[in-house]
Amino acid sequence: MLFPKLQQKLLERAENNSLRKLTVSKGMVDFFSNDYLGLARSKELSEKIGVEYEKQKGNFNGSTGSRLLSGNSEYVLKVEEELAGLFRAEKTLLMNSGYNANISILSAIPQKGDTIIYDELIHASLKEGYRLSFANRFPFKHNDLEDLELKLKKGKGDLFVVAESIYSMDGDTAPLKEMVILCEKYGAHLILDEAHSTGTFGENGNGLACALGIEQKIFARIYTFGKGMGIHGACVAGSKILIDYLVNFARPFIYTTALPVHSIVSVKCAFDYLKEKPELAKNLSEKIVDFRNNLPEKIINEGRYVESNSPIQVIKVSGNTEVKKLAANLQSKKLDIRPILSPTVKEGEERLRICLHVFNTKEEMELLYQSLNEFL
C-alpha cells in the first residue's frame, strides 16, 4: 500500500522536527520575504502595470498555448529585446520561472560525455536540471576556487561550471571574476543563476555580472523576476545561438504554456519602474550596512554570522529544535523571521535567514537588533 509509506515519511519528518507546513503571516514585520525592493507591494507599480495592461486590449487573459504555438506575440518579442539591452546580451528568452529556466538549460545543453561542475550549494532547480542531463557531474566546495580548478582538470568533453551570483541560503557572493578566469583557462562554459542579484545589483538591477563588467564572458545567465523585482517569470540571457538552441531543444520551454500577457506587462513595468527609482537600491544598500554595523558582536565572535553584502543575512543556529525555538522567540516580538531547517540545509548548518527590505522602518530595524541581543 502506498499511503502507509507516505505516512511513514511524514512521521519521520515530524520526529526530526523538520515537517513543513503552509502558514499565513498576519500582523508581523516582514524580515523573511524576497521582496527586497518592496516592488511586490508597491501600489504605484501596480497602477503602472494596470495602465500598460489596458493598452494591450485584444489580448487573451491567458496566453492560449506554448510560445511555439499560439503563445507568442509582438509584445513578448519587444519585451525580450528590451531585456537584452538591459542585461547587455545578444538575446534573451522569457521563461515561466527561474526553476523552469534552470531546468531548461541544464537538461538541454550538456550532453553525454560532457561534464557539469557545480557549486555544492546551488539551488534545487539547478540540481533538478543536471539530473535530467546525461552529462557527468560532480560538485566543488562552496566558493572554493582551488577545488573548482581540481575538478576542471578532471573534466571531460565540454565543461560547464554552474554557480549563483548570490546564494539564497547564505547570502554570500560567488567569486565571479576569478571563476571567469578559470573557465577561460580550461575552456569551460559558465552558467550563472542571477536570481537574488536581479534588481538588487548592477545598473537598473541588471545583476552582479553586469555590475562587475564580465557579462560577455559568461555563457548563460538566468535572471529571476519573482524575488527583487516583485513579480513573476524569468529570462535567459546570452548569445543568439544559445537562445535559438533553447527554443529548439529545451523541453520545459517547448512544452509549457507561455506566460500570460499580464505577466509580460508586469516584467516590463517593473524594470521601467526600477529605472525611475534609483533611490530604492541606495536605500537597500544602506539597510545592509546598518544591519552589519548593529549585529551583536558575540554572533560574529562565535563564527555564527555568514559574511554577506546582500539583503540576505544569515545567523547559524545548529539543530532544528534550537533554530525553531529561536525563530519562535523572535516571532513573539512580531518579527517574521523563519528558521531554515535540515534537510533544506545540511544537518548542523541550520540557520535564521533574515531578509532586509527598503520598507523596513528604523524602529523595526532597532527592534530586530534588540531582540537578537536578547535571544542569542
Image (spheres, helix red, strand yellow):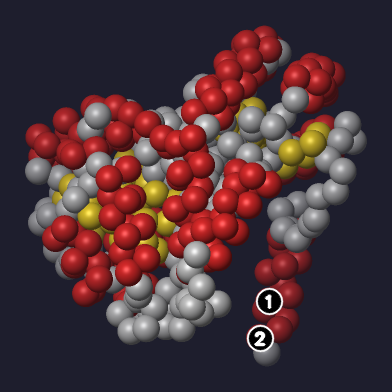
Q: Quadrant of residue 2?
A: bottom right
Q: Which residue is located at x 22 percent, y 62 percent?
A: 243
Can residue 138 be seen here? The reply is no
Relative vertical location of residue 374 with respect to residue 230 in this rendering, above or below = above
Relative vertical location of residue 304 with respect to residue 113 in this rendering, above or below = above
Can residue 76 be seen here? The reply is yes
Q: Secondary structure at mark 1?
A: helix
- Please give left or right for residue 363 compared with residue 123 in the image: right
Q: Which residue is mark 1?
A: 6
Question: Distance of mark 2 from mark 1, alpha carbons?
Answer: 6 Å
Q: How many marks?
A: 2
Residue 345 pos. (x, y %): 57, 45
Residue 264 pos. (x, y %): 46, 62
- Please give left or right for residue 305 compared with residue 115 in the image: right
Q: Decide which of 170, 208 is in the foreground and name it.
A: 208
Residue type at numbered disc 1: Leu
Relative vertical location of residue 249 with respect to residue 242 in this rendering, above or below = below
Q: Quadrant of the C terminus?
A: top right
Label 1 environment density (alpha carbons within 10 Å; few <14, some 14–19, many ≥20):
few
Q: Decide which of 17, 201 is in the foreground and name it.
A: 201
Q: Secondary structure at mark 2?
A: helix
Q: Which residue is located at x 10 percent, y 56 percent?
A: 157
Q: Which residue is mark 2?
A: 2
Q: Decide which of 59, 132 is in the foreground and name it.
A: 59
Residue type at numbered disc 2: Leu
**Do tag 2 and tag 1 residues touch (Cβ < 8 Å)?**
yes
Residue 53 pos. (x, y %): 53, 63
Q: Which residue is located at x 68 percent, y 76 percent?
A: 6
Q: Quadrant of residue 50?
A: bottom right
- Outermost residue, bottom side: 1
